[in-house]
Image (spheres, helix red, strand yellow):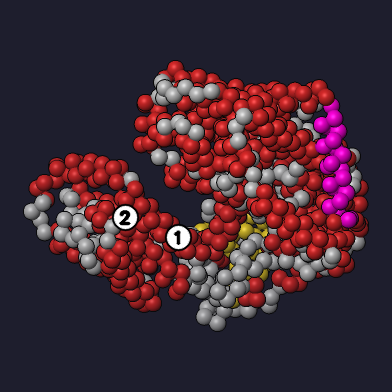
Amino acid sequence: MNSQEHATDSADERTVSPAESRFTHQITPDAEHDDPNHPHINDVPPKRIHDVGDLFRAILAVLLAAVAMLSSVYLNGITTGVESDAHTAGRALTWMVDLPTTMLQQLAIVVIVVMVFAQMLVSREWVQSVIAILAMFGGYAAAWGISLGVTAIGNERLLAALGSPNAWFGAGLLPGFYAGSAALLTAAGPRRTRSTVKWGWNVLYTVGALLVLLSVNSVAGVLVSFAAGRLVGMLLRFTVGTKNQGVWGEGLVQALAGVDLHVTSLERRLDTIAASHSTLKTTLDDDLVEGSRLYDATDDRGRHFAVSVLDSQVRTAGYVKQLWQWIRFTGVSMRRDRSPREATQHHMAMILGLKNSGLPTPRVYGVADTGESSILVFQGADAMSECNLHTLTDDDAVALMRFLSVANRRGYTHRRITPDTLARLESGTPIIAGWQNGDDASTAANVALDQVQLLTLLSTLIGPERAVAAGSHVWGADTLVALTPFVQKAAIPAGTRALDEWNKHTLDDLRARLRALAPDDTVESMEPVKLSRFSLRSFLGIALLVVAVSVVFTQLKPDEVIAAVKNANPEMAVVCLLLGLVAWLGSALELGAFIDRDKRNTVGIIMSQVAQSFAMISMPAGVGPAFVNLQFLRKSGYRTTPATAIMGANLVVYYAGTVLLMLLLGLFTGSDAISGMIPTNTLVILLGVALMALAIALMIPPVRRLAAEKLLPLVKTYARQLVDVLSDPKRLTLSVVGMLILNVATGLGFWVALLAFGHMTNPIETLFMFLLANAIGSAMPTPGGLGGVEAALAFAFGAVGVPAGVALSATLLYRVVFYWLRIPLGAAAMRWLDRRNLI
């Protein structure tokens, strides 16, 4: 009866796919066992692995040492306070002061060495023992080398922070005990695999804390020495490799028995293993698990399985990749599976969820976890095979998009659709495999990324026209148009970009096809979605911020500024500040006059002018305001060309109006100061050189064609729209009024600054001299004309009879109100605009 039941069960459970023959192996008794029922095992012990996590930890050690050293130099008050608190707490241990601390260090390292080596020798790990000894010597050498290097630099503050009462300089500056012990424990680790390594770290931490409390060693010295040893140990451990602690052979058979899988044959697929595990090979038999060990297994009921074993040390590379994706992308959620168990269980949940959605998936038998490995068992019902990328048809593209559409509608996203993930069922139906990095309950942004990745991959393989046609058939034209902002290089996996058919125009061609489906108004308003934190835009933003911070900290002279502000008349200083606010209102009127009523956001316009004050500290004068205005206009709903025309009209009004205002004031005041400021000969020479260069360029046929076909139409369009903007009398008048308010308020601000120091001047003459000197100083290619404006104002007003001390003080007060105080206000306005997507 039992044998009949067994035979029935075997027949019922047997899969129907002929592809199972790949899993079948002849079952023979193991030569080492007389029991014919003992499973046949053909396995190879896991080799030493170069764990990418070791490199990651080595980088962290370098950062720890750098932070400790920089903090000791630039945050001396904090580090001194920490040490003072530690020494205060250590008074309770004064009874230990008489103990020889050198003996304590020697005793500690002897205990650590004996413990660790005893366990390794008992385990017959000879190579690991030698590596640990070499690492300890390397740690001592690293501490010695850093000590000599810091001593050679001679920074007294750094020497004082790293040194101890018995060693202030020289080779003994850093306590080598910590470096040697840390290097030894690191090379003998990881701590989770050896209990003696774990206790060794505890001993090292305890001794380090005691010696810091007793003022024997400094906090910074201990941290730097510890980081040096950690760095040496990690680099040596990565170079030599660590023993794979994963389950294999008999242990794997026992683990499978825990999920009711009694194996009679277990065969390792050696051809799927990378010799050094430097590359993570994949196979469709386990749904493209990266870096796994794959086995073919047969149980006592005649069923055939594919057993995928993922080891923790190999998984580190996958986790680092996930971590990098999480850091790199913004606005898109990314998985971070910290252990192989998390990754495997999530992978199984994804496959079962897709199967429940009605999609064909690999047949998962179960999951087993043991030690440092996680095991995923497959029993194929409809085996997958690689898809020939060169024979894809339009029907295949439609089928792949429908497959993805079903998954996306149920909230499942793939996250990494590459050429390797395209597979075919035995029936020939194309499907998408490799869902281990996917997720459920996905956001709209993740769904869009999936669609863009598949659309780009198909566009690369069969062409953008056919790919877009298939996408329009499955997803609809509106969905494709909505994907346009996501079509960018950051969204495309490296596997797709490595195809021979890929080129630098692939995304441009695809984007052009998608834009052709949308109305012109929609196309102009589309801007790429910010996906990568490290795009060119973010890099420029960080660079400008660095420039701004550098300007603030290097050019601002607090002593002179504070002295000038303290000596100024408070009432006049307040009036100067109010005139600065009026200048912002004039600038807002100058720009807002050209904006259509339905797109005019009064508060937004004013805030955009305030934000210019922040942009000015990282860009030359005039460039920052133009950049902010252009971005604000585009975010307000204008296409690029009309926005550029409005910005151009604003600049024309400002610069032309300022020049005419200076000429009128010069004629009205009778001043001839302007006559010496026009470099006639220089201007003619520069104009001649520019015209000659233009003529030579137009003599070259390709340049001439480019100018005629590309540049000239753009210039004509821009000029026509600029004329249209300037031809409205009402708008032009309002803009001119705004320009006058801006210039007059700014010039009177300097006049009030002179009054703040008791010097009365003619306001009209002061306005003329200010506009002239400010224009000359702003021509300096420095952020906000920094340096040039100060020099021009102080020199110009000193030359017309204002005492030099008063001219300089008034200049400093003016710059405080109209430049330095505006920086934080501009930053706040920039943030306000960014939160409302207005810049």
Q: Residues within 10 Å of mark 2 (few under 14, many from 20)?
A: many
Amino acid tagged 1:
Ile
- Looking at the picture, does residue 684 appear above or below residue 317? above
Task: Decide whether residue 720 is among the magenta residues.
Answer: yes
Residue depicted at x 20% and y 56%: 164
- Looking at the picture, does residue 170 appear above or below residue 550? below
Q: Position of residue 18 (x, y in %)?
A: 81, 68
Q: Quadrant of the N terminus?
A: bottom right
Amino acid tagged 2:
Leu
Please give the residue where the numbered disc 2 appears in the rendered image.
223
Residue depicted at x 43% and y 62%: 58
> Label 2 to label 1, Cα distance in Å?
15 Å
Bounds of the magenta span?
708-728
Q: Secondary structure at mark 1?
A: helix
**Quadrant of the rendered image containing residue 81:** top left
Farthest residue in the top direction? 571
Residue depicted at x 52% and y 28%: 750
Q: Secondary structure at mark 2?
A: helix
**Horizontal side of residue 215 vs 342, given as left or right:** left
Q: Position of residue 805 (x, y in %)?
A: 39, 33
Q: Quadrant of the C terminus?
A: top right
Please give the residue where the numbered disc 1 appears in the rendered image.
59
Residue depicted at x 32% and y 58%: 224
Mark before the other along the chain sequence, 2 or 1: 1
**Horizontal side of residue 469 vs 132, given as left or right:** right
Query: Does residue 818 appear in this view?
Result: yes
Nearer to us in this view, 447 or 228: 228
**Quadrant of the rendered image containing residue 69:** bottom left
Farthest residue in the bottom direction? 31
